[in-house]
Image (tube, coloured by chain):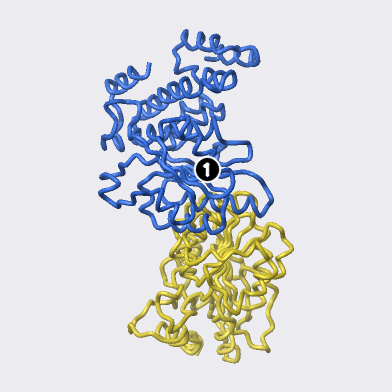
Amino acid sequence: MVQAQRIWNRNREAMSIRHAALIAKVDGIDEHCSYVLRIAFYMNQSLMSQTVLKVATRRLLRLHFEAGIGHIGGNLSCLDAMLCIYHNVMQTDDIFILSKGHSAGALYITLWSRGELTEEDLLTYHKDGTRLSVHPPSHGVPGVVFATGSLGHGVGLAAGISLGKRLRREAGRVFCLTSDGEWDEGSSWESLIFTAQHQLNVTIIVDANGMQGFGKTVEIADLEPLAEKFRSFRVPAEDVDGHDHAAVTSALMSRKMGPLAVVARTVKGNAVSFMQNHWQWHYLPMNTEQYQQALSELV
Amino acid sequence: MVNQQSRPEFAFLTGDLGFMALEDLRTSLGERFINAGVAEQNMVSVAAGMARVGLRPWVYSIAPFVYARPLEQIRNDVCLHNLPVTLVGNGGGYGYGVQGGTHHAIEDYGLLTCLQNIRCYIPAFDGDVPEMVARIFRQDSPAYLRLGLSEQTSDMTLPAYGAWRQLVKGRGSVVLLVVGPMVGGIWAAIRDVENCPNLWVLSELPSHEVPEEFLRQAAQAEHVIVVEEHVARGSTGEMLARELLLRGIHVRRFSHRTAMGYPSRLAGSQKFHRLECGLDAASVLALVRESSP
């Protein structure tokens, strides 16, 4: 690991994907895939969807497996959208708010894929004394501007950041990733109304995996068609396949000023066949056999 | 507040209140005055977001609507991040009187002082407010300003503002600590009494730095009385008792007059509710006289 870091630091400019992949192959891809990811991104952004996603998904599974925690289903469902936001859309002045705080694992992996968190950081996840709590922390992680975890806060925080930027004459969009279940919260709608009223540069991305804590979203509080409801509040909105990177990216880029909502239709437990659309993966951790089986699907 | 408009970081959000009160502020602040509508949870989250990018937002409503409705937003979005958001609650205690219990604020600073980083300001007199505003702008953390109706009379001479102030140097063996503007009425009632008590007013919470002079007086007193328009739980009285115990100071007699909710279940003015709870000046005077006949 240390040797790989030295090689990377020394040959930052000249490093090729092949070299990085070679190092990764020698010591095990998960140990060094952050370098692979970064190089892949810098060398050829079109590789993002294939290389980044697969390595990021593997690292996310490992993160949750080693910590022995659940919530992997909702992390897998939003990972594609989060990678698209960070790799394809966000600019220097933009800010991201994770309203569905229970997907912090996917956020940490995304930050790691951007080189904003290190492998060493990830190894502390969920352990005593870590900066990387299971829900995003209030301090200590660059790129995480608000602790979240109680649902229905993110859109209001994003609206406040956007309004603050406007008053300070600062540029930048604010992206806010929500779950679909958290639109049960009245505060989410309060914030949507405020965002529309003030025409704030807030882009809402809904991880619409259709399943929440204890049932299907449509059976608990059916808000469908969600995009139509957003539009009725004067927020342009559209449905997209949340695992189609081109579609997600295109939707996010469709409007750069003012409010925008993208309802990303996703699959809970995406990318792992036996996790898809099963409630147990909202809560339960993986055992060793399940983890290995999941990895085997991501070779 | 209008005087603060020259601060570029100052912004003001109201929960759709301010008719015949905030018009001048709205004019002076322009785009930095935001009517966030009847949506207090969002208003506090928005304020937190604004503070995150360098603004100093003040959030205003009737007191319970600004501390109770959005309590989780205050807890998570503001206090956990130690952001300089100021909550302004109008009508501390039973201030909204016969408007009813939904409009009263009798557990506000108890709830808020349980949270991280926040400091509560409770003006006793109108003249306290400018000094509090200045202090709030100097601190880089959350604040709550509990507004009430001053009972200061024209012949009262106040010492310079401080979190703790001794208003009357007593002649008797009673120490009386009051929180909030009702201290004006109590002061008027006790000042001509023979053996009048040492009268103190406390205006900021939490306040672990109890003045040595107060501690000395409390240790020597026959009777320490705390009066506040707030329920006993989370009150100044509880805080003071803890501070005295931690310092090993024995108090011979301790009385605590607090808001007690709605004993008769009937509605009335602020005066009516204070009377029901023994918070009116005459009741406090009677309690003082038990120890200073």
Count of picture labels: 1
- Residue found at x 46% / y 56%: A233
x, y percent for residue A135: 43, 40
What residue appears at the point 46 percent right and 9 percent down from the top-left corner? A25
Q: Nearer the viewer, residue B124 or B292?
A: B124
Tell me the shade of chain B: yellow
Dot 1 crowding, Cα within 10 Å, few <14, some 14–19, many 20+: many
Letter of the blue chain: A
Query: Above or below — where is A101 with respect to A35?
Result: below
Residue A106 at least partly seen: yes
Q: Position of residue A129 (x, y in %)?
A: 47, 35
Picture coordinates of residue B210, whole percent (x, y): 58, 65
Say which of A48 and A120 sits in front: A48
Q: Position of residue B96 (x, y in %)?
A: 48, 80
Q: Amino acid at mark 1?
A: Phe
> On screen, B30 above or below A235?
below
To which residue does mark 1 refer? A175
Name, please, the residue furthest toward the right.
B6
Q: Horizontal placement of B85 versus B288: left or right?
A: right
Is residue A129 in sight in this rendering? no
The residue lying at 74 percent from left, 63 percent from top is: B6
Q: Secondary structure at mark 1?
A: strand
Quarter of the image holding residue A232?
bottom left
Q: Quadrant of the C terminus of chain A?
A: top left
In the rendered structure, the answer to whether residue A296 lies left or right of residue A175 reads: left
Q: Chain of mark 1?
A: A
